[in-house]
């Protein structure tokens, strides 16, 4: 296989995968959303959830994205050090995004920062956004796709605290972020909290936290407890789906962390809405692939 053939193959597969991800929620998110619906007791919340599920059903029936804001495409990539087609990845993803903008269709959301001209195909300077991690001793390419809509990007926040502020400052910061603009981000949310030593590592970790499969836990017992406590506290705010009165503003709170400087505590919050359009797909060195997000789907 040549590099051009590898790029074309990846672009074809990713165009179809992006189209699928724009229309259907991944299985874990769909199941979690159902659990939230079934646990709500208020008649108002039941109506909101009914409209959510009707919307998701109609998206599939009509072959259309499940939200008008198809966001901007982000790719979180775990690239095996021995994957042979690294040079084909960026052009293939760019091509896939441009083509899916027409075929899905995705709303053209990318605007050049300074000219403010819409690029028309969701690509542009550093768009699609690619984040790379290198995985030693692997020849696979794992891609996590995510459509970042405006509603869930607006509440994003990051701040660096002094250790004297204490970990309580981090908790207050998460509550302020979620009880502010996040109410408009079509709850129930997935809340990603990044904890580290400066703005940029906390910010990336908060996004990675959002993308983690539902049901997974922080590996450290204190991290896991923080996830549980934040979820319980946020869900006691009395806010539910669509920011209306209810029992669940969040489906999950995920925390990702890194070591920090002795004199800093950095925290970032990212949220994702009920249409959490995130998909996992893995390419192997012969360019065969597996996707693990949607049971029973052949691309
Ligand atoms: S927050 Fe999510 S569901 Fe709501 S409009 Fe934005 S992308 Fe759509």
Image: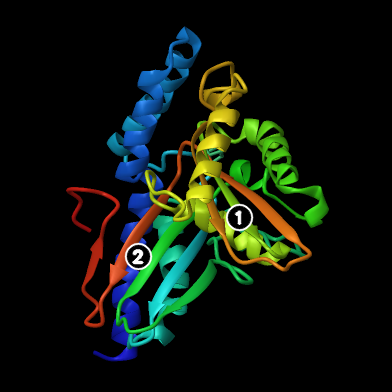
The residue at the far bottom in this view is 2
Q: Earlier in the sequence, mark 1 or mark 2?
A: 2
Q: Is residue 2 above or below residue 53?
A: below
**Mark 1 close to ligand 1, CB under 8 Å:** no
Q: Is residue 260 above or below residue 249?
A: below
* Picture quarter with ligand 1: top right
Displayed quadrant of residue 39: top left
**Quadrant housing the C terminus:** bottom left
Query: What is the distance, in whole Å, between disc 1 and disc 2 at their CAs?
Result: 28 Å
Residue 132 place in picture, x, y as percent: 50, 74
Q: Residue at x 51, y 53 (%)?
A: 209
User: Badge 2, how many Cα within 10 Å: few under 14, some, many 20+?
Assistant: many
Colour basis: rainbow
Q: Residue at x 39, y 66 (%)?
A: 143
Q: Which residue is mark 2?
A: 14
The residue at the far top in this view is 43
Residue 219 place in picture, x, y as percent: 44, 55
Q: Which residue is mark 1?
A: 194
Displayed quadrant of residue 87: bottom left
Residue 273 place in picture, x, y as percent: 52, 39
Look at the numbered disc 1 and give the secondary structure of its residue: strand
Camera-near label (1 vs 2) is 1
Nearest to the observer: residue 125 or residue 184: 184
Q: Is residue 112 left or right of residue 255?
A: right
Q: Is residue 63 left or right of residue 276?
A: left
Query: Would you say residue 107 is visible in this rendering?
Result: no
Q: Is residue 261 above or below residue 235?
A: below
């Amino acid at each position: 296989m040549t590099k051009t053939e590898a790029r074309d193959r990846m672009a074809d597969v990713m165009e179809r995968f992006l189209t699928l991800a724009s229309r259907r929620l991944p299985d874990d998110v769909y199941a979690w959303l159902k659990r939230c619906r079934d646990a709500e007791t208020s008649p108002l919340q039941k109506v909101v959830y009914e409209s959510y599920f009707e919307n998701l059903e109609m998206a599939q029936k009509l072959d259309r994205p499940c939200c008008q804001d198809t966001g901007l495409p982000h790719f979180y990539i775990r690239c095996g050090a021995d994957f042979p087609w690294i040079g084909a990845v960026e052009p293939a993803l760019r091509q896939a995004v441009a083509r899916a903008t027409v075929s899905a269709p995705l709303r053209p959301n990318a605007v050049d920062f300074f000219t403010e001209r819409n690029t028309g195909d969701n690509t542009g300077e550093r768009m699609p956004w690619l984040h790379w991690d290198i995985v030693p001793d692997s020849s696979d390419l794992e891609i996590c796709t995510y459509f970042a809509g405006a509603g869930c990007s607006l509440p994003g926040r990051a701040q660096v605290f002094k250790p004297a502020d204490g970990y309580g400052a981090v908790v207050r910061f998460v509550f302020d972020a979620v009880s502010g603009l996040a109410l408009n981000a079509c709850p129930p949310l997935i809340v990603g909290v990044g904890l580290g030593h400066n703005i940029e590592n906390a910010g990336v970790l908060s996004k990675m936290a959002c993308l983690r499969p539902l049901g997974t836990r922080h590996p450290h017992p204190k991290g896991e407890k923080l996830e549980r406590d934040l979820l319980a506290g946020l869900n006691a705010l009395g806010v539910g789906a669509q920011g209306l009165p209810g029992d669940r503003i969040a489906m999950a709170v995920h925390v990702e962390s890194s070591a920090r400087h002795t004199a800093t505590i950095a925290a970032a919050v990212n949220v994702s809405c009920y249409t959490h359009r995130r998909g996992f797909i893995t390419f192997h060195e012969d360019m065969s692939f597996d996707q693990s997000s949607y049971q029973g789907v052949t691309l």
